[in-house]
Amino acid sequence: MTEEVKQQIISTAGNMFFHLGIRSVSIDDICHELGISKKTFYVYFASKDELVAQLLRSNIAYISGKMEELLQMNDFRKLVSRFMKHQEAEKNDVRRVPQLVYDLKKYYPRQFAEFQEECFKTQKEYIMAYLEQGQQEGLVRANLNIELTAVLFAKIHSDAINDFEVIEGHGHNMHQLGHTAMDIFVRGVLSKEGMELYDGKYNH
């Protein structure tokens, strides 16, 4: 029951942060939404800062779970299709909500930096696994430097999230960025056979 209450607090706070931003939601607001006392809240979290840090760790676990789910398909053909659709449909990733990123950068810089570092490591690991699987199936270029490609793409994605104001300043949003970046990435790593498959089936 103790763990269940903690997860309810994280889940409720997360939903409120996603819709209202972190700065505008107080501990009192969270407790009121849950129907619990602040005393109960402090049993599980010493501060709002600790809650934010835990929420970010939960978000990384969520992202990892989605990426692992794709990897377990063991079929690069289907993986490419599902991954593109996943990029389009994903709504629970903190990094896709500008207000959240803004609040994290301004008011929780340490937690945000740690979150970014962990996301980078996670993305690099799974991108390498995806590409290795693709090479085995002959759909990813055999001469591709997998580790360097994974580092490069994870870094580009991390920097883009960090500077989302620049993206928005040019009239675009994070959804468009995610789709465009993934399309460029996929086209850059596929073999001739992979490109024929990608353009023929998955690029709609």
Image (tube, rainbow, N blue to C red):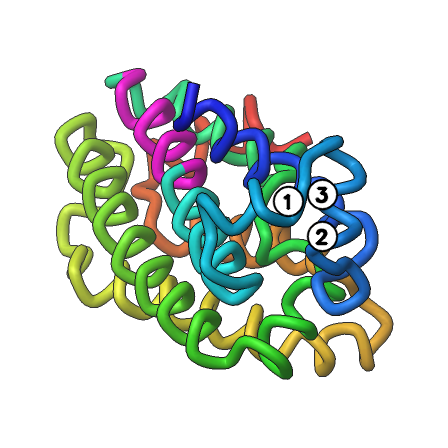
> Which of labels 3 and 2 is toward the front?
3
Left of 109 or right of it: where is 151?
left
Which of the marked residues, 3 or 2, is nearer the chain's N terminus?
2
Q: Position of residue 200 (x, y in %)?
A: 55, 26
Which of the marked residues, 1 or 3, is nearer the chain's N terminus?
1
Question: What residue sits 43% from the left and 40% below the top?
Answer: 63
Residues marked 1 and 3 touching at CB (< 8 Å): no
* Cα–Cα gap, marks 1 and 3: 13 Å
Q: Which mark is residue 17?
A: 2
Instruction: Specify the amino acid type for callout 3.
Output: Cys
- In the rendered view, tell whether residue 124 sits above or below residue 191: below
- In the rendered view, tell whether residue 82 sits above or below residue 132: above
Q: Secondary structure at mark 2?
A: helix
The boundaries of the magenta stretch are 62-73
* Cα–Cα gap, marks 1 and 2: 5 Å
Q: Quadrant of residue 101?
A: bottom right
Q: Nearer the viewer, residue 140 or 162?
A: 162
Q: Position of residue 18 (x, y in %)?
A: 72, 49
Q: Nearer the viewer, residue 103 or 4?
A: 4
- In the rendered view, tell whether residue 81 sits above or below residue 103: above
Residues marked 1 and 2 touching at CB (< 8 Å): yes
| Prevailing secondary structure of the magenta residues | helix
Q: Secondary structure at mark 1?
A: helix
Q: Which residue is identified by label 1? A: 14
Q: Which residue is identified by label 3? A: 31
Q: Residues within 10 Å of mark 2 (few under 14, many from 20)?
A: many
Instruction: Specify the amino acid type for callout 1.
Output: Gly
Left of 201 or right of it: where is 38?
right
Q: Quadrant of residue 113?
A: bottom left
Instruction: Specify the amino acid type for callout 2.
Output: Phe
Question: What residue sits 24% from the left and 43% below the top?
Answer: 131
